Image: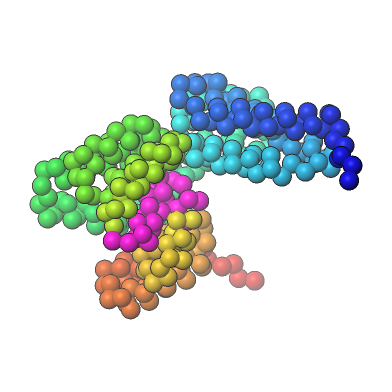
Amino acid sequence: MGKLYVPSQLHTSVDHVRQDLDRAEGAIASLNGAGSEAVQILHLLDKIERELHALEQRDADPRVEQTRFETVQRQLKRRRGPFLKEAGRALRQARAEVEPPRSRWWWYLDEAAARQRRRRWRRLGAGAAAVLVLLTGLWFAYREFLAPPPEVSKAFRHIQAGKSEVERGSLGTALEDFDAATTLTPDDPEPWLWKGVLHDQLGEAAEAEDAFAEAESRYDSRSTFIVNRGRVYFQSGDIETAKADVETAIAMDPTSGWAHYLLAGILVDEGDYDTALAELARARELARVNGNGRLEALVANQQARLLQMQPMSTPE
């Protein structure tokens, strides 16, 4: 069989897109200190998208490069906080000049972050996702009303401060608080989970794995660890990863009422009320079978709230 002929121009185009992908990966990994230059990442993603489209128009097969491009986009989503911190006002200025379509979502990261913050506050205010409020409230009540030791109270304050910093997008400062909490209460898996999630969002894979290993060692099963990790991803705003973790936990232990309960909260956040109600019904059934009265009461309360929130159907 003869050697396949590849036009030199096409070969060069593939090389160019690979080089641009390398540049994008490097820029996303080294955001700290980039300042307004971080916006160049968005221009680079535009360029890669155009190059991939051009290759497809010329009957090339850029599937490998397309997969890498999707990975780069996920990396930027996960590092949204550091990116927005560096880009600041430069993002809005550059967007006004480029006027990109909504399909290039990377130009609208600040708006997506603002929407998430608004949804989160609506959930907290109206109780739409009682998963977060009730679990946090139970944790608070345990420590506040059962007269905890001073180090536990101090660790709680660090955890609350860390969550507030996450809301503001200051992941580095939040990490300092969670690190302090692990020093004060090393047996509590909660701050270890937060450290793992934040290291992951900062692109620090090795540190994330170490923190998750510490957290998992403090749970009685891997499925319990994974559902709690999903809960923390949810609280941090990473809905996609949270949902993946919860679905994994359900696959590992279909009888986990807490996993179905958390999945219902995620579905509410996505606006899928009907499926959320089905998950709550499943969680309530499992709570009853397993004799978990506390979870059964929480589910019943959430079902009542969700039924009140559901949009009214329009009569024909």
Q: For residue 250: magenta?
A: no
Secondary structure character of the magenta stretch overall: helix
Residue 103 or residue 155, whichever sits in front: 155
Q: Is residue 38 left or right of residue 21?
A: left
**Relative to 302, residue 103 above or below:** above
How many marks are shown on the rendered structure? Answer: 0
In x, y percent, where is residue 83?
Answer: 50, 30
Residue span colored magenta: 220-243
In x, y percent, where is residue 234?
Answer: 42, 51
Q: Residue at x 34, y 48 (%)?
A: 213
Is residue 279 something one can see in this rendering? Answer: yes
Is residue 46 something one can see in this rendering? Answer: no
The quadrant of the picture occupied by the C terminus is: bottom right
**Relative to 51, residue 186 above or below:** below
Q: For residue 229: magenta?
A: yes
Residue 56 or residue 42, whichever sits in front: 56
In x, y percent, where is residue 69?
Answer: 64, 39
Q: Residue at x 21, y 45 (%)?
A: 186
Q: Residue at x 56, y 67 (%)?
A: 313
In x, y percent, where is residue 123?
Answer: 40, 52
Q: Is residue 73 left or right of residue 289?
A: right
**Relative to 137, residue 78 above or below:** above
Q: Residue at x 44, y 59 (%)?
A: 246
Q: In the orientation shown, which residue stands out farthest toward the right?
A: 2
Q: Quadrant of residue 104?
A: top right
Q: Quadrant of residue 196?
A: top left
Q: Quadrant of residue 191?
A: top left
Q: In the orientation shown, which residue stands out farthest toward the front?
A: 1
Q: How is the image coloured?
A: rainbow
